[in-house]
Image (cartoon, rainbow, N blue to C red):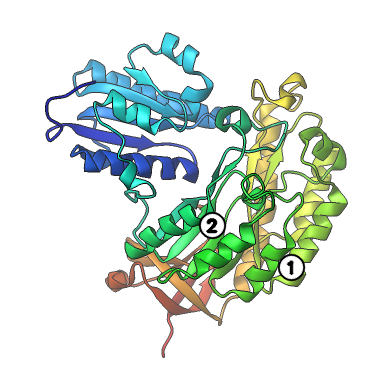
Amino acid sequence: MKTKSTTQIKINVITLGCSKNIVDSEFLLKQLDIAKFEISHNSPSINHDIVIINTCGFINDAKKESIDTIFNVVKAKQKGFVKKIVVMGCLSERYYNELKKDIPEVDEYFGVNKLQNILSFLGEEYKHELVGERLLTTPSHYAYLKISEGCNRKCSFCAIPIIRGKYVSKTIDDLSSEASLLAEKGVKELILIAQDLTYYGADLYKKKKLALLLEKLSEIKGIEWIRLQYAYPTDFPADVLKIMNENEKICKYLDIPFQHINDTLLNSMKRGHSKEYTYNLIKKIRENVKDVALRTSIIVGYPGETNKEFNELIEFVNDVKFDRLGVFEYSHEESTGAYSLVDSVKSSVKRKRAEQIMTLQENISLNRNQTFIGKTLKVLFDRVEGEYLIGRTEYDSPEIDNEVLIKNSKLSKLVGKFCKVKIIQADNFDLYGEIAKK
C-alpha cells in the first residue's frame, strides 16, 4: 500500500492474547512511529485510516475474541470509519487460508514474525537501526522482555509449536542491549517471557544459559526487579535457583505451569515429568529460594480426566498451596497431539471443576495474604484507580496476580516508584496497606 504522505494517516494497533503479543506490537509501533504515522494502541475509537489487529490463536476462547474483534472492525470499515484492515499474529499464522476465504473484507493477513512484510504493505521500509527499540504499551516503569521465540516441547494440548515454530533464543548481548534501552527509558522491572524460559540458550549456546542471562541483566543500572514467567518444569536448571536466592534483583517469584499431577494424564500430555518429579521439584525450589512465591497453571477437563484424576489434582493443589494459580478449561485444538483423543469431559463439567479449583485457591490465597498483616513490604506502584493507589510486591506479576492497595489517590506522584508499605488488611487476592513511616 503505497502512500504519498504518511503524516495524516492514523493507525490503531489492537493487541490480543498474551504478553508475547504485546512485545510484538511494541516493536511494530516503534517502526510506525518513526515512519511518521499517527499511531494509537487499543484505542476505543473506531475512526482510523488503518487498523492492525494482532491476534491470538491458542485456545477456543482466544480465537473467538480475535474473530469477534476482526468482525467489529470490518463493520466499522463498512460504515466508512476504517479504510484498511490488517490482521497479524497467531490466528492468521494458523488459519491464513480459512481467514482469507471467510473474511475477505480484511485487506491483508500476516502470520507471526512478519514485521518487515507488514511495513512493506504500508509502503514503508523496515528500519534495521531500530532493532531492540520498542514503544512501550505498559506503564513506563515495567516491560516484558521476550528472550526467545517458539518452543521445542511436544505437549499434546498445545498449538504454540505449530504456530510459532521451533525454539530460537535471542543472544545474551542482544537482550542486554534491549534491556539497557528499556532502563534508559525508566523501566525498573523486567518481566522475562518465553514459551519456555528454562530452555533458554540450549539451541544457541548448546547449554542452558538462563542463569547467566539473569546475571548479565542484573548488572544493568536502573533495573531493580527481574521476574520469571513461563518456566517449564522438566529438567529445571538448578543454577537458576541459586542466583534467584542470592541476587536481590531477581524477584523471589517463579511462574511454572505444572498443568496436572496424575501420571497417566501427564504422560498423555507429553509433559516429560511425573507426579514424583513434580513434588520433588517444588520441594527443591522452596528449600533453595527463601520465601519464594510459586505461580502455576493447571488444565481441567483434559481427555480421560475422570473424578478420580480430578480429585488427585484437588489434593495436589491443597498439598502444595501455590501462592498464585490459574486454571484453564481444556480446549480441543486441531493438529495437536491430543486432537486424536475423545474430548470426553463435558463443557459444564470442565467449568464446574475450574470453579472448584479456584474456590480452593481463594482460601489458600487468603490464608497466605493474612500472614503479611503487620509486615512491611517493598511495593512498586503501577497506577491510581478511584480512591486507591495500587501496586505490587515482588511476589506478584502485573495483570494476573495480587495487588497492594493504599486508600489515598493523592499519592499519584508515587506511581512508578518503590516504597515500603505496612500491610494492615488482607482479603482473598489483595493486600491493603499504608506508606511505612521512616
Q: In the image, what residue occupies the spot 71% across and 38% down?
A: 300
Q: Quadrant of the N terminus?
A: top left
Above or below, 380 relative to 121: below
* Tag of residue 81: none
229 lies left or right of 85 = right
Horizontally, is 438 left or right of 62 in the view? left
Q: Nearer the viewer, mark 2 or mark 1?
A: 1
Q: Residue at x 53, y 47 (%)?
A: 170
Pick the quarter of the image with the C terminus. bottom left
Closest to the observer: 408 or 217? 217
Counting residues from the N terminus, which is met first, the one under dot 2 or under dot 1? 1
The disc at residue 401 is 2
- Residue 271, by quadrant, is top right
Residue reaching furthest to the bottom: 438
In the rendered image, is residue 44 in sight? yes
Image x and y of residue 212, in percent: 61, 62
Q: Of 247 and 91, which appears nearest the observer? A: 247
User: Visible in this render: residue 428?
Assistant: no
Label 2 neighbourhood size at 10 Å, few (<14), some (14-19), many (20+)?
some
Q: Label 1 is placed on what type of residue?
A: Arg
Type of the residue with mark 2: Asp
Q: In screen coordinates, is 63 left or right of 412?
A: right
Q: Position of residue 168 (x, y in %)?
A: 58, 41
Q: Residue tagged by mark 1?
A: 286
Quadrant in which residue 342 is drawn: top right
Near mark 1 (Cα within 10 A), the count class, few <14, some 14-19 or many ≥20, is: some
Name the residue rendered at 58%, 37% in the picture. Answer: 150
